[in-house]
Image: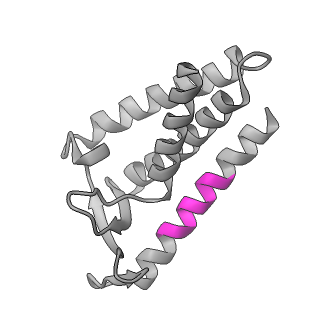
Amino acid sequence: MMFCWIGMIIIIALDRMSKAAVCKGLQDDRKLEIVNNKIELSITKNSGAAFSILTGHIEFIIRISIILLLAALIYLIVLLENVGGISLKIGLAFMIGGGISNLIDRIIHGYVIDFIYFKVKNFPVFNIADFFILSGSLLIFFNLLF
């Protein structure tokens, strides 16, 4: 179980440091093209949830985030302490770590800082926390499926 806590702390630290670095390095609406111009780094302020749904309802999103994160933490601590596969525990740790970091953004700024954009049609701008939330969701999905 200790690896879950360490993993969450690492995810939160990585996301916070990456957002700080991007905000410092890409001021004044600057953009940085990388990987043969396939990926763009630029700051986007998402005042909604995933895919900008519920934009402008930050208080509601914060409340729901806190409830869901607390439920996930309780599930991880109480139900999975001695039961459950490693992929389920890692998936939950990924989701909780990413969710906490994005929640910190929402509380401090009133929006989530996104900055990674794959230049593919309609691909959303995201951040490190979003990557871990998605990865954790997929791990849990495949764990439940198989």
> Which quadrant does the N terminus fall into?
top right
Name the residue located 78 percent from the left edge and 41 percent from the top edge.
Answer: 3
Name the residue located 71 percent from the left edge and 24 percent from the top edge.
Answer: 85
Name the residue located 44 percent from the left edge and 45 percent from the top edge.
Answer: 103
Image-based side of 75 in relation to 130, left or right = right
Residue extending farthest to the front is 146
The percent position of residue 119, horizontal first and vertical second, equals 28, 69
Q: Which residues are magenta?
A: 10-19
The percent position of residue 43, horizontal first and vertical second, equals 33, 71
Determine the image quadrant of residue 5.
top right
The percent position of residue 122, horizontal first and vertical second, equals 21, 57
Name the residue located 26 percent from the left edge and 81 percent from the top edge.
Answer: 29
Q: Nearer the viewer, residue 119 or 50?
A: 119
Using the image, determine if residue 31 lies above or below residue 46. Answer: below
The percent position of residue 12, horizontal first and vertical second, equals 59, 53
> Which quadrant does the C terminus fall into?
top right
Q: Nearer the viewer, residue 87 or 26?
A: 87
Please check the rendered image and state whether residue 75 is part of the magenta-colored stretch, yes or no: no
